[in-house]
Amino acid sequence: MKGLLTYAFLLQGIFASAQYTAVSFHNISLNEGLSQSSVVDIAMDTKGFVWLATQDGLNRYDGKDFLVLDKRFDDLTSGTNSRLGKIVPGLNQSFWIIAKGGYLERFSLINNTFQSVPVYAGKVRLVITCVLQEKNEKLWIGTENGKLLLYNCKTDQIDREIDIQPGMPRSAVNMLFKDQQQRLWVVGSSVGYLDGDQILNLSVKADELKTGLVYSCLTEDKEGNLWLGSLGGGLFFKKKNEVHFGQFRGFSTVRFPADLVIEAIFSEDKGKLWIGTYGKGLFIIDPKEEEIGQFVNDKRNPSSIPFNDILSIKQDKDKGIWIGTDGGGLSYFNANRNNFILFNNQTVPEKVEIALVRSITTDKRGNIWAGTTNKGLTRINYQKSEYKTWELPSYQKNIYNPDRIVSLFYDKKDILWIGTQGNGLILWDSKKEQIIKRFHPGSVSKLNMPDGTVWCMYPTAGDKIWVGSGSSGLCLMDKQNGIIGQYKPGNQGSVDAIRAIVSVDDSTLCIAFEKTGIQLFNTITRTFYPINSRGLNAFFSKRITIKCLYYHQSVLWIGTGGKGILAYNRLSGKTQLLTEKEGLPNNTIYGILSDARGYLWVSTNKGLSRFSPDVLRNKARPSQFTNYVSVQGLQSNEFNTGAYFKAPNGMLLFGGINGLNLFDPAKFKEESKAIPVVFTKILVDNEPVEGDTAAAFKKVIKLNYKNHSVAFNFAALDFFSSPRHYYYKLEGYDKNWIDGNQRNYVSYSNVPTGKYSFQVKYTKRGVTEGKIAKISVNIKGPFWEKWWFILLLVLLFIGLIYTLYRYRIAQVFKLVQIRQRIATDLHDDIGSTLSNINILAELSKNSLENPARANTFLDRISEEVQASSQSLDDIIWSVNTQNDNWEETFSRMRRYAAEVFENSRVHYTIKLIEQAGITRLNMEKRRDIFLIYKELINNINKHSEATEVEVEMWFQQHQLVMLVHDNGKGFDKQAKTHRNGLKNLSSRVTRWKGSIAVESDKTGTCIKIII
């Protein structure tokens, strides 16, 4: 109770014109990935990341995940001294880091690297306490020994050195600050601004001066007033035109402590001051309204400040406030996104029950009435900070839970109708705060009621009300006379529970039976009749559980338990189902309400959802639904059946398992600007891409065909919004945008080589989609996919085709030559032989009278026939491809020599190589080699008169060597002859680029042929 009263200046009335601003902090700790709980400083980069300095790591936060770099920072604070690590934005995508021990470093955001910047006075390293970046590449540096230095970032030199208190004991410079007049203020054991090479100290008013006081921080509000924090002396204040600082003690109606240890001050655009103290939590001062609020940790409230030691306060570009604590991690607050008033057990007095809300209504005095599950009735009037809970008596002893209130209705005569589960219907006088009448089973006639459970109520004329019972159908209750009518479909006995009643016209009610569907009820004829709809009948044939009804502009909206919302248009008869697929956060619908702009608000098991009824006109899309979750100020993600109500002024109320929420939809503060999406990590083959550029700054990724996969992590830098919804595509590979839902990780594998562009965008449901983040992906193919290689292959193919063509032509030409040669050989050898035979036959015929001469001619004919047969055999042998190897050739040579020398007196020796095996031979070459050999053997046999002949053949350096030696009479190589033997030999050898050597004398002849 005390805490809420302390913060009351921030609240506005439930029926006031302005929307309530909830004071609810979103806390981030080790559980979310923060490396350490003491956040000593905070900074934001140009991309939108939040950077946090802790005792154990430099953290980068994107709203979901942390990147932790190995860097440590000081966290030394006492009542008289403070030395905290710092992160200060620099130029050219960099930060200035004051790391543990007072070491100054430059941190590059582009590649996440640290560069030490040593600062010395002579040979002594100076301990750095604070820095301030100028726009002209200059950096002001404050040191622990009271020096002010001007560092030139271009030359890495100290341009100026100033003692802040010459002649006085050295004390640390705690902060450097520039005001609107561009004066540089130096804060330490004193406070002053730089004038030339001197610090002009501005003293605190003499009557408020405290001996030994150390000042820690300074800020300027929008009016030009300066606010000065101290370590143990509270807050000091100097108006724009005043000379001295004076103690700030608060306002006439509220005081401000004068002994606070203040570590951080921040002045927001609206003029409020945020004061972070050590041990006393957070103070917010509103000078215009003269109000002060203190926020301290409340262990019962997870949305309170997590720790009372505040070390740093910074604001991001979206006006969100980031608060670093000394042990509780990080807190975030954004007034633009705190749309919901929250009432739960942490924000109301301890004896007030507000958890597990089952029913809600309001009265004309601004009170909220809430029925709970097992703690009775609670009234809330937070304008007056009044809260009260009543437990209800049971009408008989055996009722298990008499305080389970499941429906409420407040009539015009200040009577609250209370419907319970099992404890009957109770009339409550809100002024006298007491029960004036109750209806229940077994009571006297006018107070008798057939059912002890009242799930829902709907008012009608006079003091009457329609009641939906647990199992007794629809009852018409009169305040004075009790039940005056009970109605069931088809005059059944026990019927299904009635969960909701809505009016569709002046004489028709729509009644929702929990498990048996919907019936219409005519209030004039008092009869039930079904809705004639095939779509509805088919839907409810599956035994769907109904949770709620809402009738709006001829459309009946039916909330179900697990099947979404079924919309039935009474005019067209059409039905349409909305589920999680279309954009709802969950398919269990507890309540449906509309606001002044026509939007529908739906409570579910996973938060609230807002959408326009226009989703029925076309196919519904997730982008048409705006969903809200507990982190945005809801009591919980889970709401309850029956716990929803629309107040007469348009305020909406929804209750759930941890309290209730109140809000004005017309005053909702929504961020409509595009949210940037940045890349946080890139992986190739499941390994992070390392290089000279961090993922957030990369423009191109170069891969090769050996890489099997590439993956992207990305984040929408929206720190306090509804669940992020992403769409992505790999342009050049994906044809359309792919709905990634809330997943911020995408992987591609086995993508063909080429140039692509990976694109991702963020859509906050109901808001314009964000900017598209792009990164080029170039996958280099293998050399065989290069144009020059393909061209080379084409040329080679053409060359191969041409070669094959030429080869084929050559083969055809060769075949023609062979045919011509065979024809020539047949003509020359066989033809001439046949001519000789013909002549010899004629001669023999003419010599028949001379038998001896005739026999001579006949012998010649026989020789010619044998010669012809031999020639024909040679021709056939030469063209038979089975003989195209050395083995067959050598065998032929042996046989021929044997045939020639068989009946002669010549003794011959043939030495032929055997290692050639079946090596293939060119047919023409084989023929010429054999003819050379044959010519040599024939010449020896006919002309040499030799008795000894030796033939040798061997291979020498891939050449055939044929050596033929005889002991004949020899011949004169120079003598002229009509014979063509040597000429033929030389011609055949020359044809195959061989050589022939002849040696001959009277002792014999030696011929050496190399082919």
Image (cartoon, grey):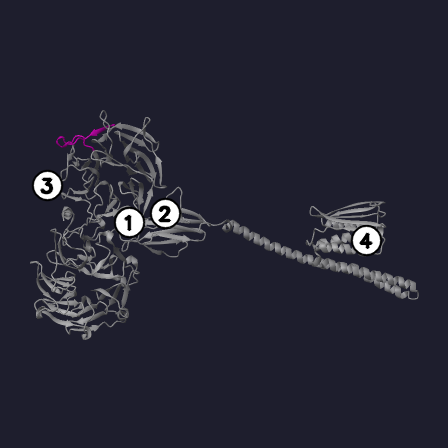
Crowd tier of the residue under label 2, counting other residues whose Cα lies within 10 Å: few below 14, some 14–19, many 20 or above = some
Q: Is residue 12 left or right of residue 27?
A: left
Labelled pair 2, 1 in contact (Cβ < 8 Å): no
851 to 119, vertically: above or below:
below
* First of labels 4, 3 by sequence position: 3
Magenta residues?
197-214
Residue at the disc numbered 2: 681
Visible residue check, residue 832: no
Q: Amino acid at mark 4?
A: Asn
Q: Callout 3: few (<14), some (14-19), or many (20+) C-alpha neighbours within 10 Å?
A: few
- The residue where tag 3 is placed is 252
Q: Residue furthest right?
A: 849
> In the rendering, which numbered label is found on residue 938?
4
- In this orientation, which residue lies closer to the viewer: 438 or 639? 438
Residue linked to disc 1 = 718
Q: Earlier in the sequence, mark 3 or mark 2?
A: 3
Chain-order first, disc 2 or disc 1: 2
Above-or-below relation of 736 to 688: below
